[in-house]
Amino acid sequence: MQRTDVRVRGRGFAAALLAAGIAAGPAVGPAAADTIREQQWHLDTMKASEIWQTSKGRGITVAVVDGGFRLDHPDLVGQLLPGKDLSGLPGGIGVDKSGHGTGIAGLIAGSGKGLGGKGAYGLAPDARILPIKININDDPAQPIDASGYLKQVSQGITYAADQGAKVINVSSVAGSSGISMGDIAELENSVKYANGKGALVVAGAGNSGQQGNPVLYPAALPSIVAVAAADRAGTATDESEHGSQIDIAAPGVDIFTSCVAESGYCKKHGTSDATALVSASAALLWAVHPDWAPNQIARVLINTAGKPKDGSSRTDFIGYGIVRPRVALTEPGDPGPADVNPLIEPAGGVTPSAPTGSPSPASSLSASPSASASASAPASAAPVPPEKDGGSGSGTALVAAGVGGLVLVAVVVVVVVRRRRAPVVPQPQPPSAHPRGQVPPPPSYGPPAPPSGDNPYTR
């Protein structure tokens, strides 16, 4: 779910390079103040220079399940582990037509070695990327089979867990149309398997907030960390999906990262970028607390997030708040129990209902919308001021259907086997319906929300 605003394709576009702050070489390179790193505002806002004094994600593997990777990109050379191609497409894992996977990998673990050391950095530059290629449909004119896509995502999650990945990033989506009950069950089982192996799955909510706000998978699954995109002021972008599935948000506008353009760099926006930054934040935290379970990592990221401006514990637009890895590293608080999933049962008993909502218009992906769609992106607000230092269960509900006897059996199953329920295929409802139904209260562990002040997410 990443959109490209600027895609530079050659030395002949020197004016565009300079306007976008993208360097293609000494002949057309921008001034020193216009290096790629200096335009990565999200790193400054998230206080990367301070974070890196404590953690750069060393020793943590982040799996990126996406549409391919430019293996020779200067910012990614040495950052990529041997991966897996599950796409069934020609060319192998090193073919990335859209640049989507390349950009996500760069946002997580880019080394900045491109352009003579003036390239793009990832938030966790010492983490390593496990590239897993799936078919995310680089050609919107040829809609992909959503069921087949979800099966590849499930396979990718399982493979990543078997390879020892601690964080599994999925920045592409499929609508519910064409997805079966079995597809969702398979996805849920793969996430449970990954959690059991010690991995956290993070997924983008999608960029269809202005196109009906449909339920999109895999982010709609309750046991997955669902990420929304925010602007420089900490407000959810108009394109970002909203609803009870949203757990946390991160920067998702004017994001400079690696790509497959000739210059090697693009400016993008969308929940894909935000997802990568949440995944990187988890890697930073895990490098310091390697004995923590996935539930504890998720809980601390939620507890230390910059809270919604209206003072509520969460909203349907940015979830429990904007991810703040610096606060998570310096004041993590009590990570809570390892065996309680804060996304489902944060206070020990409130489990959300089954996902319901309107299916997407078509069974196709929205992983890499065209640059023309960028016109709908909201304008950036003022830069974010510094934040102040502040203070596996899974499953969707089993829906009974049919005659009274089946209803009774279903009820018994729900009561006896609470956390082993079969998910359902979302049924058509108004676009405002929320995929996860009832939203659990905020986690009861960790420090209280930091006091209001300069942080735009708490004032």
Image: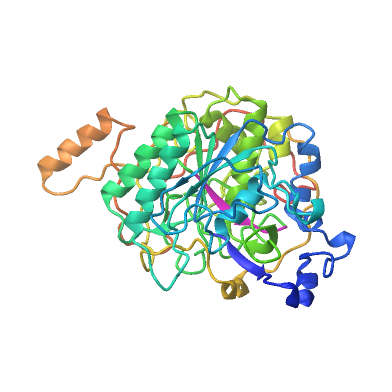
Q: Residue at x 53, y 26 (%)?
A: 293
Quarter of the figure with residue 147: bottom left
Seen from the viewer's position, the closer of residues 283 and 75 is 75
Where residue 397 appears, as percent x and y from the top left, is 31, 42
Question: Colour mode?
Answer: rainbow
* Residue 110 located within the stretch drawn in magenta: no
Q: How many marks?
A: 0
Relative to residue 24, is residue 208 drawn left or right? left
Whether residue 454 is situated above or below residue 196 in the rendered picture: below
Considering the whole magenta stretch, tell me its main secondary structure: strand
Res. 311 visible in picture: no
Where residue 249 appears, as percent x and y from the top left, is 60, 50
Whether residue 105 is situated above or below residue 176 in the rendered picture: above
Numbered range of the magenta stretch: 225-232
Where residue 259 appears, as percent x and y from the top left, is 64, 60
Q: Residue at x 74, y 63 (%)?
A: 381
Seen from the viewer's position, the closer of residues 295 and 312 is 295
Whether residue 422 is situated above or below residue 101 in the rendered picture: above
Q: Residue at x 56, y 65 (%)?
A: 239
* Residue 228 located within the stretch drawn in magenta: yes
Relative to residue 182, is residue 91 drawn left or right? right
Relative to residue 167, is residue 139 drawn left or right? left
Quarter of the figure with residue 223: top left
Where residue 402 appears, as percent x and y from the top left, is 14, 49
Res. 117 visible in picture: yes
